[in-house]
C-alpha cells in the first residue's frame, strides 16, 4: 500500500470537482451540527428533568402570619399540632413515598440562595414572609397528585397545594418540541447529505474513468481502485465534521448555556456531554460518507 | 499458455454468437496474429482472456487456470500477468511518460524503489530514452503507442495482448512498434495481436489465426494475412 500515491489521487479528485466537494462539506457540516444540536437538546432536557425528578412533586405550603389567602386569614397561621398531624397523615398515605418538612428558616435560606443574583430583592423579604411547607415525593406523580392533594386540602393551616410537574410540563413541551424539530430537520438534511455524497463520488468516478479503467486493466485490486474515492468521501465528511464541531461548541456556549440564567440550579451541560455529541457526530459523518461512497462505487465500478 | 476449449460467446443483445465453438491453443512465448474483418470476434477473443467477459459455453484456460473458476476478487491478479495495448493508446493525458508507466506499478502497490529501477529500463526498451518527462500530447502517435507498450510490459506479464496496436499509426512507424513487440516476444512473453494490417502480418511470418463470423477459419503457422487481400 502506497499512502502517498493514494493521497495524491485523492487530492486531484477533490480538486477537480471543487464545487461539489464544497457543497458536500457544507451539507455534511449543517446536517451534523443540527443533529448534534438535537442531541445536546436531549441531554439538556434530561439534565433539567433529572434535577426535578429527584425533587419534590407536591408542595403543601402552610399558613404564616403574613399569608393573605382567605382561608389562612380565617384559620390563622398553622400551629405545631396541626403541622405534626398533617405530617403523620401524609406519611400514612400509601401514595406518598417521602415527606420532608421545610421550616421557614430553611425556606428562607433556599430563597436567598436561589435569588443570590438579586440581593436587592432578597433584602426586601424577611424570614416571616416565606412560608414553611411539606415537600412530598409521590410514588406516581401523575396519578396520585389529586388523591394526596384532596386529603389535605382545606385543612386548617394549609395554604396552597402546588403541583410542581404541571409548572414544568409546559417548559418541557417547549424543549421537546424544539428538539423534535431540530432532529427532523437534521434527518432530512442527512438524507440530502447521503444523496450529495453519492452524487459527488459518482461525478468523481466519471471524471476519473480513464484512470480507473487503466487501473482495472493493469490489475489493480478493487480495493485499491475504490480507496481514493472512499478516502475522498471520508475526508469531505471529516471537514464537514470539523465545521459541525465548531458550530456545536457555539451552540452550547452561546445558546444552551444562556438557559442557565433562567435556572437557580445548575443545568449547564458539561464538557463531556459536548465531547460525546461531537464524537458521535464524527463517527456518524465518517460512517455516512464512507458507506455511501463505498456503496455508490460498487454499482459504478463493477468489474 | 492460452487454451480455448470449445468456447462460444453470445452477447445478450445479439442473436449471432460473437465467437462460436472456438478451440485452440497458444503456447508459451508464441507470437500470434489474430486477423479477420470487423465484428469477426477478435476483440471478444481478447476480452475472454482478460476475463472481461465470460464464455457462454466452453472453457478458457490461461496459464493452466480455468478462468470460470477464478473468483472475482482474484481477477486483478490474473490481469497483472497480462499486459494490454490498444489502438487508442489509453494514456493518461495529465501524466508524463514516466508517470504513465509508473502508474501501472503504483496501482498494484509496488514499492517506490522497485518502480524507480524498473520504469527507466522499460522506457529504454521501447526506445523512448530521454523522453521521460514528455507529456503524451507532446509525442507522436508512434511514440505514444510505445509508452502504452511500456506500460503493458513494465510488470513483466506472461502474455501481452494487443488490439490493433498499429491501427492509428502510419506504416513506417508501425514497423518500429512491431520491432518492440518482437523484442518483448523474445523475452519469452506470449504475444497475441489482433490486426487488420496485412503488410505487417505478411512481413512477420508468425502464426496467423483468422476469424470470420466468430469461427476459426484458418490457423496457420508462419502465415500471411490472407489470400483474399
Image: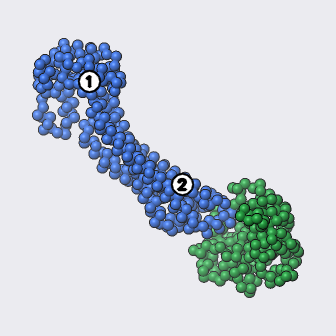
> Which quadrant is the C terminus of chain A positioned in?
bottom right
Disc 2 chain ID: A
Closer mark to the observer between disc 2 and disc 1: 2
Left or right side of A86 for B85? right
Above or below residue A232? Residue A123 is above
Mark with earlier residue (2, 1): 1
Are the numbered discs 2 and 1 placed on the same chain, yes or no? yes
Disc 1 chain ID: A
**Regarding mark 2 in the picture, which secondary structure is present there?**
helix
Which residue is tagged 1? A135
Above or below residue A275? Residue B132 is below
Q: CA distance from mark 2 to mark 1?
A: 55 Å
For residue A292, which numbered disc appears in the image?
A: 2
Query: Which of the two residues, A9 or B9, is positioned nearer the viewer here?
Result: B9
Left or right side of B71 for A135? left
For residue A94, which numbered disc appears in the image?
A: none
Image location (x, y in percent) of residue A282: 46, 50
- Kindly tell me whether residue A297 is visible in this rendering: yes
Chain B display color: green
Chain A display color: blue
Which residue: 66% across, 62% down? A220
> Which quadrant is the N terminus of chain A positioned in?
bottom right
Left or right side of A141 for A230? right
Give the residue furthest to the bottom. B172
Which residue: 73% across, 63% down? B11
Give the residue furthest to the front. B15
Amino acid at each position: 500500500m502506497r499512502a502517498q500515491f493514494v493521497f495524491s489521487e485523492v487530492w486531484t479528485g477533490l480538486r477537480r470537482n471543487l464545487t461539489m466537494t464544497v457543497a458536500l462539506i457544507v451539507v455534511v457540516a449543517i446536517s451534523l451540527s443540527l443533529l448534534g444540536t438535537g442531541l445536546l437538546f436531549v441531554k439538556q432536557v434530561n439534565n433539567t428533568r433529572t434535577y426535578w425528578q429527584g425533587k419534590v412533586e407536591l408542595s403543601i405550603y402552610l399558613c404564616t402570619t403574613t399569608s393573605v389567602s382567605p382561608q389562612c386569614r380565617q384559620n390563622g397561621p398553622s400551629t405545631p399540632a396541626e403541622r405534626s398531624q398533617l405530617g403523620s397523615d401524609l406519611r400514612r398515605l400509601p401514595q406518598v413515598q417521602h415527606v420532608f418538612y421545610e421550616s421557614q428558616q430553611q425556606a428562607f435560606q433556599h430563597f436567598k440562595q436561589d435569588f443570590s443574583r438579586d440581593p436587592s430583592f432578597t433584602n426586601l423579604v424577611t424570614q416571616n414572609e416565606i412560608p414553611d411547607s411539606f415537600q412530598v415525593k409521590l410514588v406516581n406523580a401523575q396519578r396520585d397528585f389529586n388523591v394526596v392533594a384532596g386529603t389535605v386540602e382545606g385543612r386548617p393551616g394549609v395554604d396552597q397545594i402546588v403541583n410542581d410537574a404541571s409548572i414544568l410540563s409546559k417548559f418541557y413541551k417547549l424543549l421537546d418540541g424544539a428538539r423534535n424539530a431540530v432532529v427532523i430537520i437534521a434527518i432530512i438534511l442527512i438524507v440530502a447529505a447521503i444523496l450529495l455524497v453519492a452524487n459527488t463520488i459518482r461525478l468523481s468516478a466519471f471524471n476519473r474513468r480513464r484512470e480507473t479503467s487503466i487501473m482495472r486493466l493493469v490489475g489493480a485490486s478493487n480495493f485499491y481502485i475504490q480507496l481514493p474515492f472512499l478516502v475522498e468521501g471520508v475526508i469531505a465528511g471529516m471537514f464537514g465534521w470539523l465545521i459541525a464541531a465548531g458550530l456545536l461548541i457555539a451552540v452550547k456556549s452561546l445558546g444552551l448555556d444562556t438557559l442557565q440564567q433562567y435556572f437557580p440550579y445548575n443545568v449547564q451541560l458539561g464538557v463531556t456531554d459536548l465531547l460525546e455529541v461531537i464524537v458521535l457526530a464524527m463517527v456518524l459523518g465518517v460512517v455516512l460518507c464512507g458507506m455511501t461512497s463505498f456503496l455508490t462505487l460498487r454499482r459504478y465500478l463493477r468489474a | 499458455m492460452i487454451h480455448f476449449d470449445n468456447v462460444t460467446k453470445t452477447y445478450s443483445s445479439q442473436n449471432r454468437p460473437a465467437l462460436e465453438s472456438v478451440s485452440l491453443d497458444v503456447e508459451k512465448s508464441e507470437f500470434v496474429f489474430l486477423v479477420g474483418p470487423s465484428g469477426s470476434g477478435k476483440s471478444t477473443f481478447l476480452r475472454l482472456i482478460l476475463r472481461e467477459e465470460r464464455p457462454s459455453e466452453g472453457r478458457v484456460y490461461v496459464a493452466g487456470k480455468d478462468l470460470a473458476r477464478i473468483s472475482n476478487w482474484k481477477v486483478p491478479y490474473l490481469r497483472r500477468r497480462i499486459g494490454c495495448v490498444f489502438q487508442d493508446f489509453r494514456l493518461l493525458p495529465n501524466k508524463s511518460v514516466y508517470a504513465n508507466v509508473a502508474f501501472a506499478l503504483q496501482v498494484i502497490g509496488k514499492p517506490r524503489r522497485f518502480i524507480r529501477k524498473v520504469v527507466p529500463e522499460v522506457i529504454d526498451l521501447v526506445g523512448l530514452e530521454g523522453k521521460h518527462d514528455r507529456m503524451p500530447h507532446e509525442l507522436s502517435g508512434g511514440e505514444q503507442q510505445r509508452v502504452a507498450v511500456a506500460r503493458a510490459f513494465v510488470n513483466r506479464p506472461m502474455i501481452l495482448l494487443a488490439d490493433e496496436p498499429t491501427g492509428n499509426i502510419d506504416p513506417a512507424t508501425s514497423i518500429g512498434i512491431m520491432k518492440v513487440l518482437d523484442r518483448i516476444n523474445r523475452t519469452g512473453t506470449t504475444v497475441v495481436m489482433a490486426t487488420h494490417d496485412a503488410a505487417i502480418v505478411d512481413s512477420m511470418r508468425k502464426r496467423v489465426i483468422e476469424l470470420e463470423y466468430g469461427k476459426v477459419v484458418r490457423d496457420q503457422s508462419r502465415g500471411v494475412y490472407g489470400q483474399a487481400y
